[in-house]
Image (cartoon, rainbow, N blue to C red):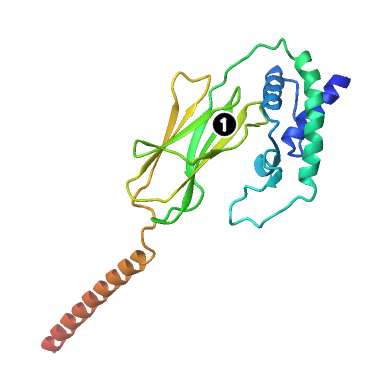
Amino acid sequence: MKELLLFLSCVLCVSADGEFVSVNSSLLIRLLIKLLINSYGEEMYGLDGEEKAYADFNKQEMIYPLPPFVDPMTVPGAYEQAVANQQSCQQNLKIVRVGMKDFPPKHIAPSVMIYTRDEVEFGENNTLICHVTGFYPAPVNVSWTKNEQKVTGSSINTPYPNKDGSFRQTSRLDFTPQLGDIYRCAVEHLSLTEPLTKIYEVEASAHSDPGVGPSVFCGVGLTLGLVGVAAGTFFLVKGNECS
């Protein structure tokens, strides 16, 4: 019982999402151990499965990776608490490693989604997001290409556990949309014999010019108006002839 309580305290200091996670599954236990072994550099705070803040021990500060439309937030004293939790986790992990050393490994393939952070407008800075989830063990490796050429400058967060015991990671790439550009994120994992690739193509449906829509509608409206005037004049003349 003492070892189980120590294990739970170590799990909570990493997930920190306010919810207890079932440890009835041996797979989940293996996943969490793997996470603890590789996550000394970060502690995440989340809500409803979404990342709200994390303590980066390398930078020695709290990071708040929230989108620009969300009101800014801070968690007073969170980084200091994370430092204390990290020390506790490192001690508890020694006990967990001994207790779970006989569990066999199992590989689970990821699923991948690619999408943009904001609505796409040509020439406006944006971010491509490659979200990878449902895999074991952690981590995955994500690489990016633009028009078949490798690109650098992307970022990827630390693996986080899902409620079913699998992991998720998110890679981000800043980009400026231009018509016809094709981006690919390629995910490598131990469960895959070749990278799993998702494609994002910048299409003409993006807002290339805020003035194009109004101009088109004005042109169509003017044309219809002139047609209406011409038709009205025609019938007026015909009516006069009949009378």
Q: Quadrant of the C terminus?
A: bottom left
Q: Quadrant of residue 233?
A: bottom left
Counting from the top left corner in percent of width and height, residue 134 is at 58, 28
| Vertical position of residue 77 compared to residue 221: above or below | above
* In-front residue for pair 240/216: 216
Q: Quadrant of the N terminus?
A: top right
| Residue name at image x 72 percent, y 21 percent | 29
* In-front residue for pair 83/74: 83
| Residue name at image x 39 percent, y 57 percent | 207
Counting from the top left corner in percent of width and height, residue 151 is at 42, 39
| Vertical position of residue 61 compared to residue 187: above or below | below
Q: Is residue 14 visible?
A: yes
Q: Quadrant of residue 100?
A: top right
In this rendering, position of residue 28 left or right of residue 242 = right
Give the farthest residue toward the left. 241
Dot 1: what SS? Answer: strand
Q: Quadrant of residue 19?
A: top right
Dot 1 amino acid type: Thr
* In-front residue for pair 22/222: 22
In this rendering, position of residue 157 left or right of residue 39 = left
Counting from the top left corner in percent of width and height, residue 115 is at 48, 43
| Residue name at image x 52 percent, y 19 percent | 191
Q: Is residue 20 visible?
A: no
Residue assigned mark 1: 133
Badge 1 local density, few (<14 within 10 Å), some, or many (20+)? many
In this rendering, position of residue 57 left or right of residue 126 = right
| Residue name at image x 47 percent, y 53 percent | 119
Counting from the top left corner in percent of width and height, residue 14 is at 73, 33
